[in-house]
Image: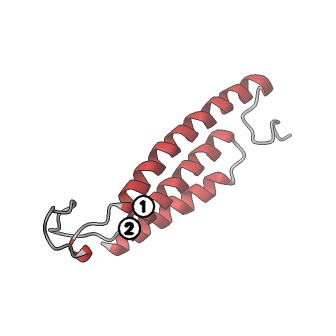
Amino acid sequence: MELILAIGMGVLTGSGVWLLLRPRTFQVIIGLSLIGYGVNLFIFSMGRLRVNTPPVLQSGAVVNPADYADPIPQALVLTAIVIGFATTALFLVVLLVSRGLTGSDHVDGREPN
Protein backbone atom coordinates (compact mmCIF):
# COMPACT_ATOMS: atom_id res chain seq x y z
CA MET A 1 0.00 0.00 0.00
CA GLU A 2 2.85 2.39 0.82
CA LEU A 3 4.40 1.80 -2.60
CA ILE A 4 1.15 2.61 -4.40
CA LEU A 5 0.72 5.78 -2.34
CA ALA A 6 4.32 6.86 -3.00
CA ILE A 7 3.94 6.21 -6.74
CA GLY A 8 0.68 8.17 -6.75
CA MET A 9 2.31 11.13 -5.02
CA GLY A 10 5.24 11.00 -7.42
CA VAL A 11 3.05 10.82 -10.52
CA LEU A 12 0.84 13.70 -9.37
CA THR A 13 3.79 15.90 -8.43
CA GLY A 14 5.81 15.01 -11.54
CA SER A 15 2.86 15.63 -13.85
CA GLY A 16 2.18 18.91 -12.06
CA VAL A 17 5.76 20.10 -12.51
CA TRP A 18 5.70 19.10 -16.18
CA LEU A 19 2.46 21.03 -16.73
CA LEU A 20 3.80 23.97 -14.73
CA LEU A 21 6.58 24.38 -17.30
CA ARG A 22 4.18 24.52 -20.27
CA PRO A 23 3.59 27.82 -22.13
CA ARG A 24 -0.21 27.95 -21.81
CA THR A 25 -1.86 29.40 -18.71
CA PHE A 26 -4.54 26.71 -18.41
CA GLN A 27 -1.84 24.03 -18.29
CA VAL A 28 -0.05 26.00 -15.57
CA ILE A 29 -3.26 26.15 -13.50
CA ILE A 30 -3.84 22.40 -13.86
CA GLY A 31 -0.19 21.79 -12.93
CA LEU A 32 -0.56 23.81 -9.75
CA SER A 33 -3.67 21.82 -8.87
CA LEU A 34 -1.89 18.49 -9.42
CA ILE A 35 1.01 19.58 -7.23
CA GLY A 36 -1.50 20.57 -4.56
CA TYR A 37 -3.14 17.13 -4.75
CA GLY A 38 0.26 15.45 -4.44
CA VAL A 39 1.07 17.52 -1.35
CA ASN A 40 -2.35 16.70 0.12
CA LEU A 41 -1.65 12.99 -0.30
CA PHE A 42 1.73 13.47 1.37
CA ILE A 43 0.21 15.30 4.35
CA PHE A 44 -2.56 12.72 4.63
CA SER A 45 -0.05 9.84 4.55
CA MET A 46 1.92 11.42 7.41
CA GLY A 47 -1.08 10.75 9.70
CA ARG A 48 -0.53 6.99 9.34
CA LEU A 49 -3.39 4.62 8.75
CA ARG A 50 -4.94 3.25 11.92
CA VAL A 51 -7.15 0.18 11.68
CA ASN A 52 -9.90 -0.58 14.22
CA THR A 53 -9.26 2.52 16.32
CA PRO A 54 -11.94 5.00 17.36
CA PRO A 55 -11.57 8.55 16.02
CA VAL A 56 -13.01 10.26 19.13
CA LEU A 57 -11.84 10.12 22.75
CA GLN A 58 -14.18 8.57 25.31
CA SER A 59 -15.00 10.69 28.33
CA GLY A 60 -14.02 9.41 31.75
CA ALA A 61 -11.60 6.77 30.45
CA VAL A 62 -7.82 6.63 30.70
CA VAL A 63 -6.46 8.08 27.46
CA ASN A 64 -3.63 6.46 25.54
CA PRO A 65 -2.98 8.61 22.43
CA ALA A 66 -1.52 5.64 20.55
CA ASP A 67 -4.95 4.00 20.52
CA TYR A 68 -6.67 6.80 18.59
CA ALA A 69 -6.52 8.17 15.06
CA ASP A 70 -4.68 11.47 14.53
CA PRO A 71 -7.16 14.14 13.34
CA ILE A 72 -4.57 16.84 12.54
CA PRO A 73 -3.56 15.58 9.04
CA GLN A 74 -7.22 15.13 8.15
CA ALA A 75 -8.02 18.70 9.18
CA LEU A 76 -4.99 20.05 7.29
CA VAL A 77 -5.94 18.22 4.10
CA LEU A 78 -9.55 19.35 4.32
CA THR A 79 -8.42 22.96 4.75
CA ALA A 80 -5.96 22.60 1.87
CA ILE A 81 -8.69 21.23 -0.42
CA VAL A 82 -10.94 24.20 0.29
CA ILE A 83 -8.13 26.74 -0.20
CA GLY A 84 -6.96 24.94 -3.36
CA PHE A 85 -10.45 25.05 -4.83
CA ALA A 86 -10.76 28.77 -4.11
CA THR A 87 -7.36 29.64 -5.61
CA THR A 88 -8.07 27.52 -8.69
CA ALA A 89 -11.34 29.38 -9.22
CA LEU A 90 -9.51 32.70 -8.81
CA PHE A 91 -6.80 31.64 -11.29
CA LEU A 92 -9.45 30.62 -13.83
CA VAL A 93 -11.12 34.03 -13.57
CA VAL A 94 -7.75 35.75 -14.02
CA LEU A 95 -7.08 33.45 -17.00
CA LEU A 96 -10.35 34.40 -18.66
CA VAL A 97 -9.78 38.13 -18.10
CA SER A 98 -6.20 37.89 -19.36
CA ARG A 99 -7.31 36.01 -22.47
CA GLY A 100 -9.98 38.60 -23.12
CA LEU A 101 -7.53 41.49 -22.79
CA THR A 102 -4.56 40.04 -24.68
CA GLY A 103 -6.27 37.60 -27.06
CA SER A 104 -3.77 34.88 -26.12
CA ASP A 105 -3.51 32.27 -23.39
CA HIS A 106 0.29 32.10 -23.33
CA VAL A 107 2.02 32.76 -20.04
CA ASP A 108 4.02 35.68 -21.48
CA GLY A 109 0.96 37.07 -23.31
CA ARG A 110 2.06 36.54 -26.92
CA GLU A 111 2.21 33.70 -29.43
CA PRO A 112 5.66 32.50 -30.53
CA ASN A 113 6.54 33.15 -34.17
Q: How is the image coloured?
A: secondary structure
**Residue 63 position in % (x across, y down):** 20, 73
**Residue 82 position in % (x across, y down):** 46, 43
* SS assignment at label 2: helix
Screen quadrant of the C terminus: top right
Which of 55 and 112 lies nearest the eye of the viewer?
Answer: 55
Q: Which residue lies furthest to the right in this view?
A: 113
Q: Residue furthest front?
A: 60
- Crowding at dot 1, Cα within 10 Å, few <14 / some 14-19 / many 20+, comes out as some
Residue found 73% across the figure and 23% down from its top: 100
* SS assignment at label 1: helix
Is mark 1 in CB contact (under 8 Å) with mark 2?
yes
Residue found 20% across the figure and 63% down from its top: 57
Which of the numbered marks, if any, corresponds to residue 41? Answer: 1
In this rendering, would 70 be left or right of 85?
left
Which of the numbered marks, if any, corresponds to residue 45? Answer: 2
Q: Which residue lies furthest to the top in this view?
A: 100
Report the number of numbered marks: 2
Residue found 78% across the figure and 24% down from its top: 101
Which of 24 and 113 lies nearest the eye of the viewer?
Answer: 24
Which of the numbered marks, if any, corresponds to residue 20? Answer: none
**Residue 14 position in % (x across, y down):** 56, 62
- Crowding at dot 2, Cα within 10 Å, few <14 / some 14-19 / many 20+, comes out as some
Location of residue 108 (image quadrant): top right
Q: Give, as a three-letter code, the residue at label 1.
A: Leu
Q: Give, as a three-letter code, the residue at label 2.
A: Ser
